[in-house]
Structures are given as C-alpha cells and as structure tokens.
Amino acid sequence: MSAVDTLLVCALAGLVAAVVMDLPMFLMPEGFTPASVAAAKLTRQPIEAVSQVAAQVVHHGTGLVGGLGLGAAVVVLEPQLGLWSTVILATTVLTVFIINFFGFVVLPRAGFDAERRETVFQQWLFSAVVYGVVVAAVTLLLLPS
C-alpha cells in the first residue's frame, strides 16, 4: 500500500474513532464540554458562545488529524517494527498525548473550578481511551498486514 493510501486509511480511522467517541461523550454528564472547550480556544470565544456545530467540527476534525498523525507514524515505522507493533505504539503515544494536551494545556484555560475541571478531565480521559482503541482497531482492520 502506498504512503498516501496509508495516510488516507488512517485519517478515515481517526474520523471513525472520533464519531464512535461521541457515544461515551454523549452519555456522560459533561457531554461535549471537551469539544466546546477546544473549539472555544481555537476560535478565541467564550465557551458559552461556541455553537454545537463548531464544537462538532473541531472534535471530528481533530480526530481526523490524529488519524493522519497515526498514518505518518505507520509510514515511517512500519518497515522497521511491523504493522501491529507500529499501530499499537503510535496509538498509545497519540492517546497519551491527546489526554495530556487537553488536560494540562487546554482545559486549565477554560475557567472552570477545580471540581468541574476534574470531572471534565476524567470524562475526557475515558473518551480519549475509546478513541485510541477504536483508531487502532479500525487501522488494523483496514490496512493489509
């Protein structure tokens, strides 16, 4: 498979994983707060001013970009490590990165009190792990081994 095909497959896997991630986000009390916080920071608006559409675009767009990052790692590392090792390693790094970037860079700037910040972070942690598992599974399902 060409590098471009690999990048496209992984981008699709990232988008699919972001869509699947909607389910746990929808079921938790804070819902799409992480997506709204991210959209607010990107658009430099207050969280309350961010539309649901903007939050969804940022959330799903970020999932797609994460998939592209995974694809770049697969293109570079797969010849040395093999597909499974590369995907598991890269999705682990990606998941840890998105958890920490949101939790320690983006979320503290939301202006929430400590209790709400912790609640949002815990729900984000669970949702991000769902993303990581799904993006790895879809990538391994769609890429030839």
Image (spheres, rainbow, N blue to C red):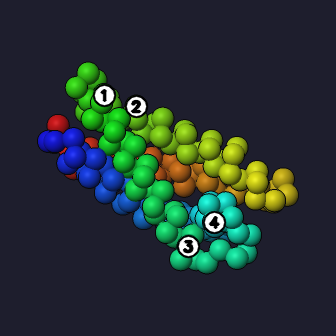
Q: CA distance from mark 2 to mark 3?
A: 31 Å
Q: Earlier in the sequence, mark 2 or mark 1?
A: 1
Disc number for residue 89: 2
Residue shown at 69% from the left, 46% from the top: 105
Disc number for residue 77: 1
Q: Amino acid at mark 2?
A: Leu
* Secondary structure found at label 3: helix
Q: Are marks 2 and 4 in contact (CB under 8 Å)?
A: no
Q: Are marks 1 and 3 in contact (CB under 8 Å)?
A: no
Residue shown at 54% from the left, 55% from the top: 127
Rendered location of residue 131, percent (x, y): 46, 52
Q: CA distance from mark 3 to mark 4?
A: 9 Å
Q: Amino acid at mark 1?
A: Leu
Residue pointed to by mark 4: 43
In this view, the mark in front (4 or 1): 4
* Secondary structure found at label 4: helix
Residue 141 appears in the rendering: no
Left or right: where 116 falls relative to 98 = right
Residue shown at 45% from the left, 61% from the top: 61
Q: CA distance from mark 1 to mark 3?
A: 34 Å
Q: Are marks 2 and 1 in contact (CB under 8 Å)?
A: yes
Q: Earlier in the sequence, mark 3 or mark 4?
A: 4
